[in-house]
Image: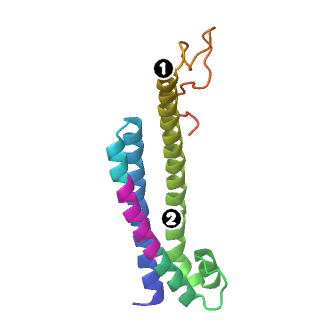
Amino acid sequence: MSALEQLIAALQTLAALYEKLIALEGEKRDALVAYKPARVEQLTADEEILIAKLGEVSARRTQLLDALLPGSKQPTLTLLIERKPECAAQVAPLREHLRQLGSELARLNRLNTQLCGHALSHVTGHLQTIAQSGICAEQGTYNRRGAARAFAARALLNRNA
């Protein structure tokens, strides 16, 4: 098998792993919204295994690009397409597919980060309320006029995400 064929196989493997990771991120979002910490923990462990596999395949991709582009400081798929137009027909669609998968994964990661942050702020607010309720007669969440302070509940989902 030539280095180009090996590279194409590595890129296809990367795409399949990214697709699995995207599916896991979607499941994690659902578990975060439903507040299922055990499921989030399990999905995070599965995610770590996938990320380790991604690292191995990505290292292999880098080795193959080094072999195909000797002397390049930073061999990339774009550079391979520019220097070897005969590879463009096979590599360009895979590169674009990987770019789209990366964008989708980044979007899901941002959403899950926001969901985790919101859940933690709610837990922190509830803990502050419990901790302060034994110290003083007034709740720590609202002032005498009923205006929220220190802890203000927010929506779990941001419509901009």
The mark found on residue 117 in the picture is none
Where is residue 45? Give x, y as percent: 36, 57
Residue identifier under label 1: 134
At a point 37% along the width and 35% down the height, the residue shown is: 34
Q: Residue at x 50, y 23 (%)?
A: 129
Q: 15 and 154: which one is in front?
A: 154
Mark 1 closeness class: few <14, some 14–19, many ≥20 residues within 10 Å: few
Percent of width and height locating residue 140: 56, 20
Region in magenta:
44-57
| Mark 2 or 1: the one toward you | 1
Say whether marks 2 and 1 touch (CB < 8 Å): no
Q: Secondary structure at mark 1?
A: loop
Q: Residue furthest right?
A: 73
**Residue 53 found in image quarter:** bottom left
Amino acid identity at mark 2: Leu
Q: Residue 98 bears which disc, if any? A: 2
Q: Is residue 56 magenta?
A: yes
Residue with the most extreme top position: 145
Magenta stretch: includes residue 51 = yes
